[in-house]
Amino acid sequence: RTGALPEPVFAARLRFLAEADRLKSVLRATTIFDGSRPENSAEHSWHLALFALLLAEHGTGAPDPARAARMLVLHDLVEIDAGDTPLHGGHDAAAQAAKEQAAADRIFGLLPPGEGAALRALWEEFEAAETADAVFAKAVDRVQPVLANLETGGGTWTSYKVDRDALERRVGTPVRRGAPALWAGLTPRIDDWFGPATPA
Amino acid sequence: RTGALPEPVFAARLRFLAEADRLKSVLRATTIFDGSRPENSAEHSWHLALFALLLAEHGTGAPDPARAARMLVLHDLVEIDAGDTPLHGGHDAAAQAAKEQAAADRIFGLLPPGEGAALRALWEEFEAAETADAVFAKAVDRVQPVLANLETGGGTWTSYKVDRDALERRVGTPVRRGAPALWAGLTPRIDDWFGPATPA
Ligand SMILES: [Ca+2]
């Protein structure tokens, strides 16, 4: 085994990796933790992989940390074409989903068929949020901006005028589903920032 | 199993993850592939994880792509304290190694002991470059800037006045060790950029 491969397969992999580089220029609504600049989706994905490796013990249904990390490395690639949709920004979910499917066709389609299909399946699994690995990965994707906002004194909660109920709905629900202990652990700090909850 | 953990363990993990965020502000000599700005070590690490997942077939000794990716997610964390040392910049290797050991003490030391030790062992394995996963991960770490330089028309080869022999020594040797087919596949493009090799 020399590891050598037919030239077109090798060239396709390099082309995909060069295209992936563009994720470093997709900017998110959230900043990095010192508040100095917007976070980009590539470094965000790196951070999430590290979260997955460290926090899997808090996940529901014994997620595989390495597999969740792999999912998170890939999960934002479609944003190269479809852009980031800020969670608290409001957007047309169906239109965004259609854009992301077209992006997945093009981007995973750069790879040799079997290989592109395997990565796309992992991305589709993440999107569907049904397996333990995906539900945990989704929770991690939601919880990282919470830490960024806490570190920066408000962040997107301030810029998008998010209230405690909206946070519970958009963030608390998926985090409690995939990693309940994470949400429980963060709740005191979140409550502290938002002030007393709206009485039911 | 609730996934809940003693408060200090949870707090330590969050503190480590918040500290890790600072890797997004460590700038490298290499630019992103459109040449518009320096690459930071966090997005670089993300890119390398993707390289590992896609190129393991070209690796020597059947490296485990997921394990190599995990190693690459962690491999630059010490730069938060020790900074990035440009490969073609020339530096005191012993002094840099000492700085990185001190950085590893502090950064992995933020975690609960067993957990910090496990991550540090993975980083030490990468640094030692003896196992198949580490040798492959090292090759990937060296080959990604080659692509960046080819995409940007020279990059650090121009800024550091690198010649073909120096490239062979600093980059070709580790890449051929960990993923010979990668170096063979890139050689025509590299030769093309540098022009005819110096006669022996
Ligand atoms: Ca590196």
Image (cartoon, coloured by chain):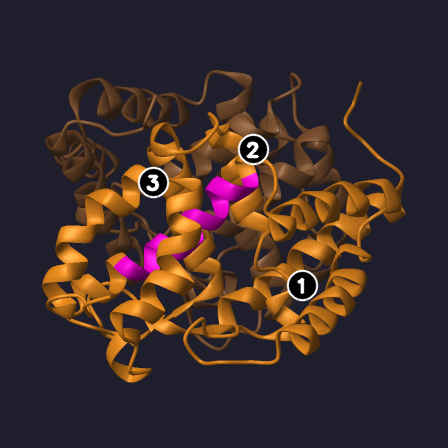
Chain colours: A orange, B brown
The C terminus of chain B appears in which quarter of the rendering? top right
Within 10 angstroms of label 3, few (less than 14), some, or many (20 or more) residues? many
- Residue annotated with mark 1: A19
B46 drawn magenta: no
Q: Is label 2 in a helix, a strand or a loop? A: helix
Marked residue chain, label 2: B
- Residue annotated with mark 3: A180
Residue at the image position 42 percent from the left and 58 percent from the top: A43
Residue sitting nearer the eye, A156 or B40? A156
Magenta segment, which residues? A134-146
Q: Is label 1 in a helix, a strand or a loop? A: helix
Whether the residues at callouts 3 and 2 have beta carbons within 8 Å, the answer is no
| Distance from the alpha carbon under mark 2 to that under mark 1 | 26 Å
Q: Residue B173 carries which label?
A: 2
Q: Nearer the viewer, mark 2 or mark 1?
A: 1
Instruction: Report if residue B165 is visible in the image.
Output: no
Within 10 angstroms of label 1, few (less than 14), some, or many (20 or more) residues? some
Left or right: where B140 falls relative to B159: right
Residue at the image position 63 percent from the left and 38 percent from the top: B53
Residue sitting nearer the eye, B111 or A58? A58
Q: Which amino acid does label 3 sit on?
A: Pro
For marks 3 and 1 on the same chain, the one whose residue lies earlier in the sequence: 1
Left or right: where B121 falls relative to B64: left
